Image (spheres, rainbow, N blue to C red):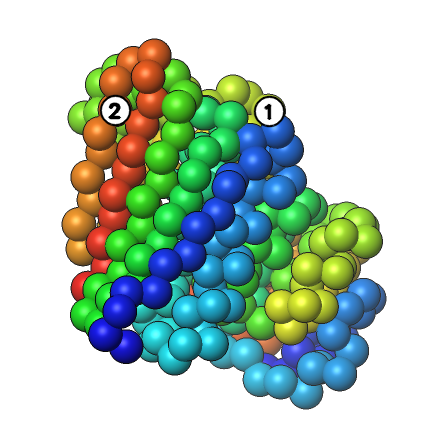
Amino acid sequence: MKISKIVELLGAEVVCGEDRLEEEVHSACGCDMMSDVLAFVKDQAVLLTGLCNLQVVRTAVMMDMKCIVFVRNKKPTDDILELARESDIVILTSPKRMYTACGVLYTNGLQGGTVAHS
Amino acid sequence: MSEPIRFHFDVDGDNFSSAGEASVQVKRMLRQIGISPDVIRKVSVAMYEGEINMVIHANGGDADVIVEPNKITIVLKDVGPGIADINLAMQEGYSTAPENVRSLGFGAGMGLPNMKRYTDDMKIESEVGVGTTVTMTVLF
């Protein structure tokens, strides 16, 4: 799925990384606990989260993710956007809640992918 | 690459939002010197969790990364409160982190287990009231 499709499906706003929307992503995870992302993510390129701080971007960097979706209209601060730009990570914000956002992407074909360390 | 390459960082303990800066830098540097992505992931995740721990529990400390031809060693040294029971601290879900850390996405008792999981060897030396040194090795 292209990131542009995620934007469309989630009614999202692109706040950073407008030039990377044609990139393909194949799996995603939804999580607010960054240690769990670090423990269980394997190759998921998209992180949906309701947590909105610098550690979300750093966690995504560590896991080589391409795109972060802040759900429930969380607005990232300038320092978050700066780090995302430096790290080539697309940032989206969506008004949808976590459960709905994940469900919409899943039913449209974006899989959960494999789990690391299972 | 015969001589080891060394990186040193002072981990600032005053500010949770800066926790992880050193790990992000290490990730970039390892990429520049051509280390494979799998190894970079292991090293940077393990160091990131360790860095977060140092900020939450020990008011920061020193982080050293030593790159050799077949392994990378990460040494995290703090002069924090120490770990009273290392076996207990290693259990998934056990945490002594304050509640506010949980609202920031950490403190779920996954840090040390994650560090062990991502490295080939992890050694914890700790004395209550003196400090903790964690040495992790990733082989390749």
Query: Dot 1: what SS?
Result: helix
- Percent from the top left, x then y, of residue B111? 37, 39
In primary-sequence order, the first of circles 2 and 1 is 1
Residue B105 image-quadrant placement: top right
Pick whichever, A42 or B114, lies toward us: B114
The label on residue B126 is: 2
Can residue A113 be seen here? The reply is no
Give the amino acid at mark 1: Asn
- Percent from the top left, x then y, of residue B125? 22, 29
Give the amino acid at mark 2: Ser
The label on residue B100 is: 1
In the rendered image, which quarter contains the N terminus of chain A?
bottom right
In the rendered image, which quarter contains the C terminus of chain A?
bottom left
Answer whether labels 2 and 1 touch (C-beta < 8 Å).
Answer: no
Pick whichever, B16 or B104, lies toward us: B16
Few, some or many C-alpha atoms within 10 Å of disc 2 (few <14, some 14-19, many ≥20)? many
The residue at the point 55 percent across, 31 percent down is B13
The residue at the point 56 percent across, 42 percent down is B19
